[in-house]
Image (cartoon, helix red, strand yellow):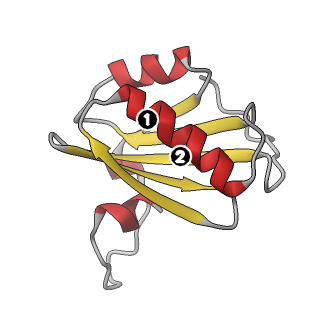
Amino acid sequence: MNVNPDFKYSIGSVLFLAFELSDKKWDLVFCDGKKYRHVTIEYCQTEKVTFAISEAKTKFGLAPDCQVLSCYEAGWEGFWLHRWLATQGIDNLILESSSIEVNRKAKRVKTDKVDGK
């Protein structure tokens, strides 16, 4: 996917999704631009991902056909998840963890939920 730097969205028209992936569970953090929702599912359960996306759209009052933008860190799952998300019509970015800027001097809480946000 080519990311357009001029991409504009209006709050309430896009569902954002961040995955935190591990070998036992996946943490999904949803955001509509104002509120967050955190869901934990079992590892590799794509039907539960689909259900969680649908549920998040309902909870946030978004249209069932609204755009979904997702991301996850490269590594654990490789590219099969990216390909599956694309077949679901979800725009996904795979991020290299070392390319995410963090303040190394600041104290930082390290949890999957915080990383997702």
Measuring from the top left, give residue 49's x and y in whole percent.
43, 35
For the residues carrying marks 2 and 1, which lies nearer the camera in this image?
Answer: 1
Find residue 5 and report its image quarter.
top right
Disc 2 crowd, CA 10 A, few/some/many (<14, 14-19, 20+):
many
Placement of 94 over or under 104, stated as above or below: above
**Residue at mark 2 to residue at mark 1: CA–CA distance:** 10 Å
Query: Horizontally, is 17 left or right of 35 in the view?
Result: left
Q: Residue at x 40, y 75 (%)?
A: 103
Q: Position of residue 97 (x, y in %)?
A: 33, 49
The disc labelled 1 sits on which kind of residue?
A: Val
At label 1, counting other C-alpha atoms closer than 10 Å, the crowd grade (few under 14, some 14-19, many 20 or more) is: some
Identify the element where label 2 is drawn. strand
Left or right, 12 with respect to 27, comes to right
- Residue 17's disc is 2
Q: Quadrant of residue 2?
A: top right
Report x, y in % for residue 32.
Answer: 68, 56
Tell me: residue 58, above or below residue 53: below
Q: Name the residue that disc number 1 marks.
A: 49
The circle drawn on residue 112 is none
In the displayed structure image, the side of residue 99 where residue 85 appears, left or right: right
Looking at the figure, which quarter contains the N terminus? top right
- Image point 59% across, 27% down: which residue? 90
Which SS class for mark 1? helix
Residue drawn at the location 40% of the way across and 68% of the way down:
102
The residue that appears at 44% across and 61% down in the rendered structure is 101
The amino acid type of the residue labelled 2 equals Leu
Q: Is residue 5 above or below residue 86?
A: below
Q: Which residue is most to the left?
A: 23
Rendering coords of residue 59 (x, y %): 64, 55
Residue 68 placement: quadrant: top right
54 to the left or right of 33? left
